[in-house]
Image (spheres, helix red, strand yellow):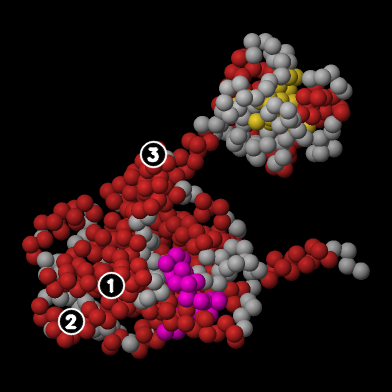
Amino acid sequence: MDRFPQSKAASAMGLSSWLPLRALRGWTPRDLNGDLIAGMTLAAIAIPEQMATARLGGFAPEVGFFAFVAGSVAFALFGANRHLSAGADSTITPLFAGGLAMLAASGSPHYLALAAILALMVGLIVTLSGILRLGWVADLLSVPVTTGFLAGIAVHIIVSQMPGLLGLPSESGETLRRVGEIAGSLHLTNPWSLGLGLGVFAIVLGADHISPRIPGALIGMVLATTAVAVFGLEDRGVEVLGALPNGLPHAGLPLASLNDVQALVPLALLIAIVVMVQTAATSRSFAQQGDAPDVNRDFVGVGAGSIASSLFGAFAVNASPPRTAIVSQSGGRSQFSSLVAAAIVLALGAFGGGLLPDVPQAALAGVLMFVAQHILRWKVFASVYRQAPVEFALILITMAAIVVLPIETGVAVGIGLSLLHGIWSATRTLPIELEQVPGTSVWWPPAKPGAGEKLPGVLVAAFQAPLSFVNADRFKRGFCDLVDAGKGDVKLVVLEASNIVEIDYTAAQALIETIAYCRNAGAIFAIARMESVRAQEALARFGIIDLVGPQRIFHSVDAAIRALHSGQPENQESTPWSS
């Protein structure tokens, strides 16, 4: 007879959650039609986008195709989300392009090798983060900081694409210097290039306004390419892609020196964090009804995509919210839709290079201009400005840091600001005195002076945050101030601890000192409603239960007051974790 059937069942379920092809589990032939339509729609959207994103990073357009194929196939094998699309992404491309440009000339063999090594490093970090269940890392960036980060990326995209849009020579170097050089060359603008780029931008924008499922970028690219061929615009100074090589890349581990790897570590960590943040947001936003999002498993899928991409000489990939939305809205039922799109894109990259020689560079710039305005979260800008002016400053500072500083430094500044803002929020917490809601046993923060009731000689105070080293001193000083405000009349102090979910070593020492202060002031100290298991374990580990006394730890404030203030026996109520 099996003594542990539930444990074995749980282990089996845990093992099955890591098996490949989880995103295709439950697929039936009835899902084929929806997945085919979604896959063809995704391919139509992805083809121009992947070409443009590869160009943004300093790569040949076909490299974007191979990154998309690698990301799509790897995620279908190892990811969990049924709709998520992984591939070349305009959010991280400026990041690694700016970082790699400091180590090698853009487009050089060394640059391409570094990009592949970076993709391998990012893929390993993201994959290991999923295996180790580090999904919480995705919460390192707050919404204001993320909004500022995306705004800065949008500025980088716009500045990088202005020469292509205007028909000017490409610029390199710092963003502000490039803006100055572009402004000084405006009189050299090629009107044909500008017209093509703005026309593609208008088509993509209009199609997206009508329905995101309309492949506006593909329509615009076809029309622009046709115009170049029919009107001979290449002879009028319009720059085109030229014929792309047919065939598949050769697989193999990217090669780089130890010095190169060491130089790439900070950049790999920054990009991995950004990938995890965007993957988690996409996974949570597009979880299929009835399926809980498995962020950690999706980290593994996206990380595997970067690893596969590196093996084919391409660059790091990321989850794409817009493409994922396309799959969802087009009726996709599983990752089979991404495999269909990958097959179409692979066929174009392998055999269709001759179809793309007349694609104008300005058309690709128009597509990326649309991407840039799309990632600017105007509604979030306005909402944060109205509701949280201090956090709006975080948006502006992060955006400015990414635009003015080297882009990887700007991202690091944004992450640091997000963490500091979270710490600052925690340090602002002070103990507050609670009042009893008249006619009830409920103790609540006072809504307005005189609205609640207080008992003579009783101080009930709450601390509405985890208790840690960042706020331990404020906790102690705030509690002592509340006791002192009683002018020696406080005989019972009850800590209402329902919001204290964690207690670290520094905070435990502050709590011990607070208990001693209350006792020296002639008051009994009790704890009520400490519901967190981690906080309960901390009380035992740091000896606070023995210091307070198990008989002075209660399920409710009312029980503490009845036992200790009315003179009833203190052991009337036992604590559930002191035995």
Which span of residues is magenta-colored?
319-344
412 sits to left or right of 226: right
- Disc 2 to disc 3, C-alpha distance: 49 Å
Nearer-the-camera pick, 303 or 502: 502
Hey, which residue is sitting farthest left in the picture?
A: 187
Residue, disc 3: 389
Q: Which mark is residue 37?
A: none
Residue 125 on image: x %, y %: 50, 60
Residue, disc 1: 203
Residue 362 on image: x %, y %: 21, 72
Residue at image location 51% in from the left, 31% down from the top: 428
232 sits to left or right of 559: left
Nearer-the-camera pick, 468 or 253: 468
Q: Which amino acid lies under the numbered mark 3 shown in the image of this protein?
A: Pro
Q: Secondary structure at mark 2?
A: helix
For the N terminus, the quadrant is bottom right
